[in-house]
Amino acid sequence: MRKFLVLLTLCLSMGATATGVMSAGSDDPVPWPFAEKCPFPWKTFDGVWQIVDGQLADVFEFKVVSTTQSGARIIEVKRFDEYMNHIASGRGLSPVGQTLVRLAMYNVDPDQYPSSYTVFVGNYLERDKYSCEHDQVHTVVTIRSYFNDRSYDRHYVIEKIRKNESSQPRRPKHPAP
């Protein structure tokens, strides 16, 4: 009985200390205020997505390049800065039934820190909503460094701005500083 009480106290204290980011799985980020995961939007995923956060104006281009015999999808991603300079690329594998896409990213400029990181993309429902089919669902990109813990995760709501038609988004290119 005493072991049970110690275990219960430990579990409750761990749950009470979680702030900001809740974890729905071993490495699945669930950014506040989005608490419920929704099915992944595979039918509309290919294309160009822009961060709508206001702090960052980066753009991501996602493309499903193939599907394995088991049904897992192989995804390529390119990341562009606000001037549409290509700043990072990556690739990921999403097994069948996953609600989160994980992508390994590397910077085009190897001197930029961190040179590599992970990007997670998922669909989330606001806590006060009840249905992934009928309420506003947000697609969120999470950027996680390989060198820091989860407390440094950055979460951004993204919105699709264009379907994939070419390998590069259409915006005027400005020279990199």
Image: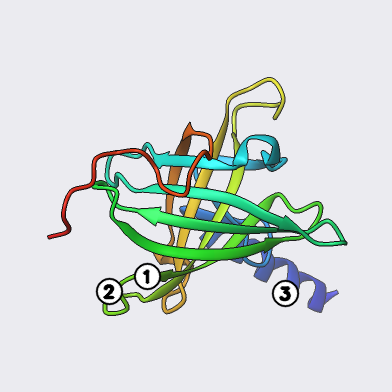
Residue for point 71% across, 57% down: 66
The reply to whether the C-beta atoms of the residues labelled 2 and 1 are less than 8 Å apart is yes
17 horizontally vs 4: left or right: left
**Tag 1's secondary structure?**
strand
65 or 101: nearer the viewer: 65
Crowding around mark 3 (Cα neighbors within 10 Å: few <14, some 14 to 19, many 20+) is few
Crowding around mark 1 (Cα neighbors within 10 Å: few <14, some 14 to 19, many 20+) is some
43 horizontally vs 79: left or right: right
Vertical order, 49 against 72 (above or below) = above
x then y, percent, for residue 167: 47, 49
**Tag 3's secondary structure?**
helix
Quarter occupied by the C terminus: bottom left
x then y, percent, for residue 86: 34, 58
Residue 13 shows up from this direction: no
Residue 8 sits in which quadrant? bottom right
Vertical order, 38 against 136 (above or below) = below
Crowding around mark 2 (Cα neighbors within 10 Å: few <14, some 14 to 19, many 20+) is few
User: What residue did someone put label 2 on?
Assistant: 112
Dot label at residue 6:
3
46 horizontally vs 85: left or right: right
171 or 60: nearer the viewer: 171
User: What residue did someone put label 1 on?
Assistant: 107
* Residue at mark 2 to residue at mark 1: CA–CA distance: 7 Å
* View extreme (top): residue: 134
